[in-house]
Image (spheres, rainbow, N blue to C red):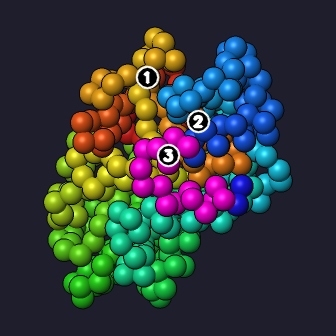
Amino acid sequence: MKDYRTKLFQIDKEDTFNEMCLTAFHFQYKKIDIYRQFVDSLSVQPSSIKYYTQIPFLPISFFKTHRLIKGKAQAVFKSSGTTAIGRSQHFVQDLKVYESSFLKSFEHFYGFIKEYCVLALLPSYIENGDSSLVYMADKLIRNSKNRESGFYLDNSKELANKLKNLDSQGQKILLLGVSYALIDLIENHQFQLKNTTVMETGGMKGRRIEMIREELHQQLKSGFGIESIHSEYGMTELLSQAYSKGNGLFESPSWMKILIRDVNDPFDILPNGQSGGINIIDLANIYSVSFIETKDLGKINSDQSFEILGRFDDSDIRGCNLLIA
């Protein structure tokens, strides 16, 4: 797969993306036993697939019940959750692919990480110890090369003081935080920030009552004194993220694509503008499964941005990167 990895982050047109999808599909069909069994159960002939919309998408619940990997794992990321509902496990064979994915994606949307001081307010994920989000934040902190970058757990006063001081000095700041912790911060401190990007990673995780995105973002904008709240959309089962710079409109990097399926017919891919279940293609997930049927609901707009509208009612509450709308 050396040639594949060389091309992965250089995709610049639809034909190349489709070619890479077909390569990933045939590789995973051959190497991932449970995915091959799933495809075969649908009576799909791999040789008949010519376009990525024809590729079967594996229900995301399989990450809770099966070891989806080709080869040995360098790391195992786990979703937040309880033992009662089970936790997804993502066995990652090559962490360098993950690192390249989130670093190149961040650079594409936000510029060089060395320009930022990264402040990570992710207490619940830090406590888990096996979070892909914490792994990403740690690498962003390290790669920023800024001595003020770091994680914050319960020391909100220190964080507030640092945030105000650095922002007033003109330092570009990325404040990456889980929703309930950001709300806690602005309830105890008031800000008027000018050089800070506040990026929420979703979910109240049972710490607070869930609220719609518009309400959450309005509170955060008021509390931080800024015009927009950014968001990150990713999950344990992926090695790529999409970002929103405001208004809940997400964009994904060129190696990640969102498709919308009919809620009553999972094999019917809907046109832009229609709401349905979200399917994700993550070509960075080459050693696992790149084609995932999620339990999120959304729609794709005419400009190819997408929105998260909620979740299927029968799905369990996930801890990371989703607000119920």
Determine which of the numbered discs, if any, sits on residue 245 in the image. none
Residue 82 lies, in percent from the top left, at 64, 37
Q: Residues within 10 Å of mark 3 (few under 14, many from 20)?
A: many
- Residue at 60%, 27% in the rendered image: 49
Question: Amino acid type of disc 1?
Answer: Ile
Q: Secondary structure at mark 2?
A: strand
Q: Tell how many labels.
A: 3
Which residue is labeled 1 in the image?
Answer: 269
- Measured in 3D between alpha carbons, the distance from the residue under mark 2 to the one under mark 3, in whole angstroms, is 13 Å
- Tell me, yes or no, whether the highlighted magenta stretch contains residue 282: no
| 14 on left or right of 187 | right
| 253 on left or right of 32 | left
Q: Main secondary structure of the magenta part?
A: helix
Can you say whether 127 is above or below 323 in the image?
Answer: below
- Residue at 56%, 30% in the rendered image: 50
- Residue at 24%, 36% in the rendered image: 302
Q: Quadrant of the C terminus?
A: top left
Q: Nearer the viewer, mark 3 or mark 1?
A: 3
Which residue is labeled 3 in the image?
Answer: 17
Q: Residues within 10 Å of mark 1 (few under 14, many from 20)?
A: some
**In terms of sequence position, does the residue under pointer 2 or pointer 3 come before the other?**
3
Asked whether residue 86 is in view, the answer is yes
Question: Amino acid type of disc 2?
Answer: Phe
Magenta range: 3-19
> Is mark 2 in CB contact (under 8 Å) with mark 1?
no
Residue 296 lies, in percent from the top left, at 45, 31
Q: Depth check: give the residue in front, 126 or 190.
A: 126
Which residue is labeled 2 in the image?
Answer: 291
